[in-house]
Image (cartoon, rainbow, N blue to C red):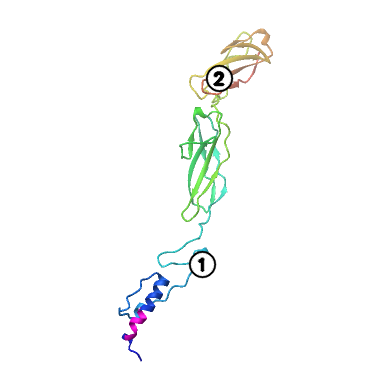
Amino acid sequence: MLHRRLLAPALAVVLAVTGALALGGSVQPAGAAVDVAESYAAPAAAPSTTDLLRGTYTARQGRLSGTRKPKIINVKRPQIVGTPSVRGTVKATPGRWNPKNVTVRYHWYLGSQQLKSTNRVLAVRPSWVGKRLQVSVVAVKRGYQKATVASRRSAKVSLPSLAPSAPLGLIGRPTVGRTLKVRLGSWGAKGVSFSITWKSNRATVGTGKRYRLAPSDRGHRVRAVVKAAKRGYDSGRASTPSVRVS
């Protein structure tokens, strides 16, 4: 039997060449002493096409991963809550998502223009009158693909309407020869101007804050119709209860 040290040079060449070709290693010089048991390692089996597609093949320096993250599913669409009126606010609901406990981000749009605001609550500006709002909600969660869903468009942005905070009323005794006066109350804004028309049954009989009851009003029902106006607001209209004149 040939001595192990006599065979080592030849074996080293064969193994070094084989390992270099299979594993990208280097060829050892023919004269180098090699311990066969310590130097030889069988080359890894080449990955199959199926393994590569599935992302299950583990390379020596890393792992090929072809697995896609699961999607976040929208269960209930986000909504815009509130009337889009100037000087008012609207609020976005986050919607419902599967899985739960996602993190959401808000992106507001005025028509096709994206606004800078990313808050859940949006203050409505005068320059937006006549346009519609929309909010897009982005849901993110670690380990999942992010999802984006937009709300339906809002009604057109409008000017705020003037309206009395309490029912209007008449002050005075409804008797011929006496004077009635309108109790205007508050209309939700300062500096409101009023236009008042007096009605006796259906006929217009006077204007202004006061009206002196005439003999022709006897037996009729008298009331005052009030119109309110202010720049930057939609005009308001309200009527007092009617009273029968004696």
Say few, some or many: other residues with alpha carbon within 10 Å of mark 2 (under 14 / 14 to 19 / 20 or more). many
Instruction: Specify whether residue 246 is in view.
Output: no
* On screen, residue 23 above or below 207: below
> Mark 1 belongs to which amino acid?
Asp
Q: Residue 27 at x, y = what percent? A: 35, 73
Tell me the residue that label 2 is attached to. Answer: 228
Q: Amino acid at mark 2?
A: Ala
Residue beneath the point at 32% across and 86% down = 6
Q: Residue at x 58, y 40 (%)?
A: 152
Q: Position of residue 83 (x, y in %)?
A: 55, 33
Residue closer to the observer: 107 or 197: 107
Quarter that holds the C terminus: top right
Q: Disc 2 to disc 1, how far (Cα)?
A: 77 Å
Within 10 Å of disc 1 (Cα), the crowding (few <14, some 14-19, many 20+) is: some
Specify the label residue 51 is tagged with. 1
Give the magenta-colored segment's residue range: 6-12
Q: Is residue 140 magenta?
A: no
Q: Quadrant of the N terminus?
A: bottom left
Residue at 50% across / 65% down in the picture? Answer: 52
| Residue 215 appears left or right of 5 | right
